[in-house]
Image: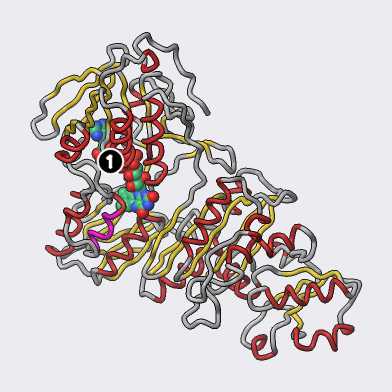
Amino acid sequence: MSPQTEPQSTDSHNSGRYRRVLIVGGVAGGASCAARLRRLDETVEILMIDRGPYVSFANCGLPYYVGNVISDERRLLVASREMFHERFNIEVQTDTEVTGIDRKAHSIAMRDVRTGNTRTERYDVLVLSPGAAPIRPPLPGVDLPGVFAVRTIPDSRRIRSWIADHNAKTAVVVGGGFIGLEMVENLIHRKLSVTVLEKLPQVMPPLDPEMAVPLMEHLATKGVQLHLGDGLARIEERDGGGLVVVAESGARLPADLVILAIGVRPEAALAKDAGLQIGPRGGIVVDAEMRTSDPNIWAVGDVVEVQDVLTGQETVLPLAGPANRQGRVAAESIAGRATHFRGVQATAVVGVLGLTVASTGASEKGLRRAGVTSFQKVYLHPGHHAGYYPGAHPIHFKLVFSVPDGRILGAQAVGFEGVEKRIDVIATAIQFNGTVHDLAEAELCYAPQFGAAKDPVNLAGMLAQNVLNGDMPVADWLELDRTDALLLDVREPDEFARGHIPKTINLPLSQLRSRYAELPKDRDIWVYCAVGQRAYFATRFLAQHGYRSRNLSGGYTTYKALKAAGVVP
Ligand code: FAD
């Protein structure tokens, strides 16, 4: 949605007479905007205001400060107030909250959070980058001492002190998303025993459920207790000290500290009170230049709604990359340059105790929610580098693409190494409206210790091509309990004996050429192996001998994940 921009006032930036730019929020979006604007315009006066004690700090580093991976707090300060002044001639006002916007008078009201003193400042141009606030549900006990959200350096400092002062041994992290999981990792580094309470039956909500399974298994091997499919009801004080997190089911989870990480919501109250247009997701509505419904006010970062380039729907995406790029776009727009923000596709990565989880674009469940049905998916589990070179680890990979044009819609990957580089390649392909054919053809780095001559990205594209051109028709895992197709496992008997899909017959690929006549020609045959490759060979062989064969993409490895996620019975 584009804001309904009100008529331009006579002193708008287009007249070239703007002198004074005020920026509310001095971290990712705000600081980017300020620095870029200065590079474009040496004459304008820039004042950046933040209610916290710092500007331009590394929010993304906060969990690692709690975990002592970053032990020196000063390392979190990317740029200081002095640096902004000296290097960029940008004035910074910290510990100052902006409490109101008077759009008619072109002024903002501010309050010094230490003294309570108030004053107003006039602007020609206002930029809002106040971010998003952690959600604190209105439940009993969420404000008890020992219950924390992580947003600022002082938040992390308080958590560190709490752990030390209370000799904390146990923690409950409420919410299994990005920030929750980063906190899990860092609390484990601090030798705490950690339980995750998550309302959904999976961690990492952006992932399709089966793709979260390797992550959940990994967390379990690291001793993290997962209490899934259960929401937070209240937090109580425990007799003798400490806390108890009480779940909706009545389960009681004791903890010496509790981290609330159930999501964030745009800090749009200032904009709303000023009558700026707010979208259905609670964020400020902006146009492609990041301008709000007021032509003198721009907004960037976690506080805005942006378009998802894949679904076309408005969304909020609280990530640092978009915030930084939007800050730059806003600066260019303010300076009168032709510019636009292209929208988002939710490219993200998280590292959890050695495992990497990354995704870009739409998930299968997101597409279904949006009513999109014309897509297909492939699963693959290739090594992160050539198998003959020591130390290859599998990457669990899912690629979702549009049918019949093959446009890439999204990808998710989980593994120990090389995960984010594959997702970054696919993210870039999506940005150029790439297709699975482009992935199949992509020319990527290869030496044995880094990749494979057919990189996992190429393989994903090739598999998808095979689906599109009919070389490898795939069966839908979701139909597994409804189909009357013959299920054919082409792994070796010892593999079959270690576990297989119920009601399956075993005819190993190594015997298929001599025994295929045993198979019925009047029935669909759904073929699987361990990860999909042998089943692909079998599917091709059978198809060329007149059989109606389909591949169960990703094989038994994918089946186990789907089953663990409850997607197949
Ligand atoms: P912020 O960077 O949050 O800055 C907003 C600032 O505005 C704050 O300092 C706030 O105090 C100030 N403010 C708000 N209201 C007012 C007011 N009325 N007056 C004055 N000042 C005000 N993203 C990633 O992409 N990767 C990561 O690994 C990652 N890790 C994260 C880890 C944590 C713990 C957190 C909290 C966030 C993480 N993020 C990550 C998200 C990323 O930090 C945000 O998307 C990004 O900082 C948003 O930038 P912003 O400018 O919109 O808001």
Q: Is residue 96 left or right of residue 312?
A: left
Residue 546 figure quarter: bottom right
What's the residue type where badge 1 is placed?
Val
Mark 1 residue's CB less than 8 Å from ligand 1: yes
The residue positioned farthest toward the bottom in the image shown: 494
Question: Going 41% across and 76% down the picture, which residue do you hit?
Answer: 221
Q: Identify the magenta region.
A: 61-67
Asked if residue 53 shows in the view, the reply is yes
Q: Position of residue 504 (x, y in %)?
A: 74, 79
Between 90 and 505, the one nearer to me in the picture: 90
Q: Is residue 360 magenta?
A: no
Between 199 and 13, the one nearer to me in the picture: 13
Asked if residue 262 shows in the view, the reply is no
Task: Give the class, few, some or many, for how many residues have Cα within 10 Å of label 1's Cα (few <14, many ≥20).
Answer: many
Quarter of the render that holds ligand 1: top left
Question: Going 72% across and 67% down the picture, which residue do you hit?
Answer: 481
Residue 502 figure quarter: bottom right
Q: Quadrant of the C terminus?
A: bottom right
Residue underneath mark 1: 27
Question: Going 22% across and 61% down the picture, which residue do you hit?
Answer: 70
Q: Position of residue 367 (x, y in %)?
A: 61, 48
Q: Position of residue 170 (x, y in %)?
A: 25, 68
Residue 539 figure quarter: bottom right
